[in-house]
Image (spheres, coloured by chain):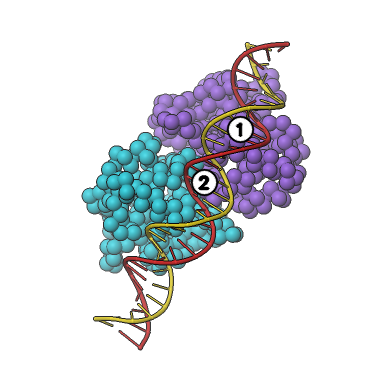
Chain colours: A purple, B cyan, C red, D yellow
DNA sequence: CGAAAATTTGAGTAACGTCAACTCAAGTGG
DNA sequence: CCACTTGAGTTGACGTTACTCAAATTTTCG
């Protein structure tokens, strides 16, 4: 099922930008439907920390990640930030039936995103049972992910949260080479995602490394040494 | 829009069991659609802590709360528990397109629930655009609630979480009399919902009480004295 | 290569958890 | 009706985890 072949022509840095093709294969999702809007898709490039849209903006488009990583987050007055999710190549975001976006979307690193007019998508939905179905299962999966995340942040210790995060990323990361997992986001992003501080992330990683559970070849990659131990820490419930 | 009139005939204790009528009015939701399945709805009563269904059970029905309060939660091996949501009268749960329930549903106190066969609901969905729409907005709202909850548990202190919880309950509780808010669930439930301990809940409530923000006439009610202070603690983002 | 930012490590502290005792409310049976 | 039982809620003392502040180190990018 080759998808979005025409969208991706520009060569991208393999380090930070991973293409759709590797992720999309085998998973139905919404991608196939969005391809019907290919003509109307705007290809947008963002630099590190640039906003795709801000919380409160009019929700005029829906988006699909072509390459890179986008974080969905909310800022609060006094500098605190909550990262609710990371969008990887192939992931669709900005859907929700709201008129204004309830969260901000920012590029973690250099990223490419395709924007489709929301109106056209809604038109596409009408009298389109397969799309409606896929849309429902999209929400359903998203909800399950969010509830899992809620579980992680309410019940688990710092070490356990980091373990859960690595497991989660290893399951999402189709480009994982061997047992190497890419972490395109920075430590602060991970911290705000897990409800911890940068320092605690570092210490937890160091602790897992010392225990022989993982190796950390560089700041943006993790090697899984003892997956069983990692799963045990993450606590059985690692279902996606 | 009078809804589900025939479902409720048994008189219920006003203390713990609140009826659909007060909540359903004015909100479209899925209730109107479920009434088409009225004939097939089974009325079920549960005692305190009884399970409506357990995590892993076959998802053969969907449910609507008629009276009482249901908690949706997950248990983990070592005794920890995460409460992901509380369902109040009128709320629909058990939807999600999964074959097995990914969470447990338990009665917080005496509760009445109406169960509808999932198969019939799916049939009802087919070629039913308005229902499909309401279903989508149901998911959308649920997702927004869960993300808000994620924000609360990752970013806020104990006091702030309790403040957020009270605000949330005051917004959901249509039966709030004046500024009295009912808390049908116990302290342990609140603790597992907010990712804290029972003791911390008590201390936070005591702290808010001492600050003159709330009053606590009894363990299952809270009076809002200084709503502005409470909102400030909960942090602007109290959108439902 | 050099400046700026991110990551990592260390030391001290605050917030929340743990353990334990006590109080209170509700239900039960005599 | 009341003593008794039981479980939930509350409060206090203490311990632990994770946060804060600070500095060293590495990486990134102009």
Q: Is residue B155 above or below residue A156?
A: above
**Outermost left residue:** B178
Q: Is residue B117 above or below residue A96?
A: below
Point out which mark residue B53 bears: none
**Residue drawn 30% across and 59% down?**
B218
Q: Is residue A70 visible?
A: yes
**Residue drawn 64% across and 39% down?**
A203
**Residue drawn 68% across and 31% down?**
A220
Q: Look at the numbered disc 2 and give the secondary structure of its residue.
A: helix
Query: Tag 2, which chain?
Result: A
Query: Tag 1, which chain?
Result: A
Apparent side of residue B218 relative to residue A216 in the rendered image (left or right): left
**In the rendered image, residues at marks 1 and 2 fall on the same chain:** yes
- Total tally of numbered discs in the picture: 2
**Residue drawn 58% across and 20% down?**
A47
Q: Nearer the viewer, residue D13 or B194?
A: D13
Q: Residues within 10 Å of mark 2 (few under 14, many from 20)?
A: many
Point out which mark residue A187 bears: 1
Residues at marks 1 and 2 touching, judged by CB atoms closer than 8 Å: no
Q: CA distance from mark 1 to mark 2?
A: 20 Å
Q: Quadrant of the C terminus of chain B?
A: top left
Q: Position of residue B228 (x, y in %)?
A: 29, 39
Residue receiving disc 2: A150
Q: Nearer the viewer, residue A231 or C12?
A: C12
Q: Position of residue B38 (x, y in %)?
A: 36, 59
């Amino acid at each position: 099922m080759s998808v979005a072949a025409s969208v991706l022509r520009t060569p991208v840095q393999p380090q930070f930008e991973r293409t759709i093709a590797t992720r999309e294969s085998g998973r139905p999702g919404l991608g196939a439907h969005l391809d019907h809007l290919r003509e109307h898709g705007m290809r947008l490039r963002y630099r590190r920390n640039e906003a795709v849209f801000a919380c409160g903006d009019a929700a005029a488009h829906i988006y699909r990640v072509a390459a890179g990583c986008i974080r969905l987050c909310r800022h609060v007055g006094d500098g605190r930030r909550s990262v609710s999710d990371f969008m990887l190549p192939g992931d669709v975001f900005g859907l929700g039936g709201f008129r204004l976006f309830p969260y901000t979307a920012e590029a973690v690193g250099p990223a490419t995103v395709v924007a489709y007019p929301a109106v056209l998508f809604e038109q596409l939905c009408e009298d389109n049972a397969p799309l409606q179905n896929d849309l429902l299962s999209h929400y359903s999966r998203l909800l399950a992910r969010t509830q899992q995340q809620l579980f992680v942040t309410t019940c688990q210790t710092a070490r356990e949260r980091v373990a859960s995060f690595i497991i989660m990323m290893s399951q999402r990361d189709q480009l994982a080479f061997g047992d190497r997992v890419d972490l395109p986001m920075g430590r602060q992003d991970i911290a705000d995602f897990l409800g911890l501080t940068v320092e605690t992330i570092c210490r937890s990683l160091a602790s897992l490394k010392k225990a022989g559970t993982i190796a950390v070849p560089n700041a943006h990659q993790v090697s899984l040494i003892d997956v069983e131990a990692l799963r045990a820490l993450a606590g059985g419930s690692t279902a996606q």
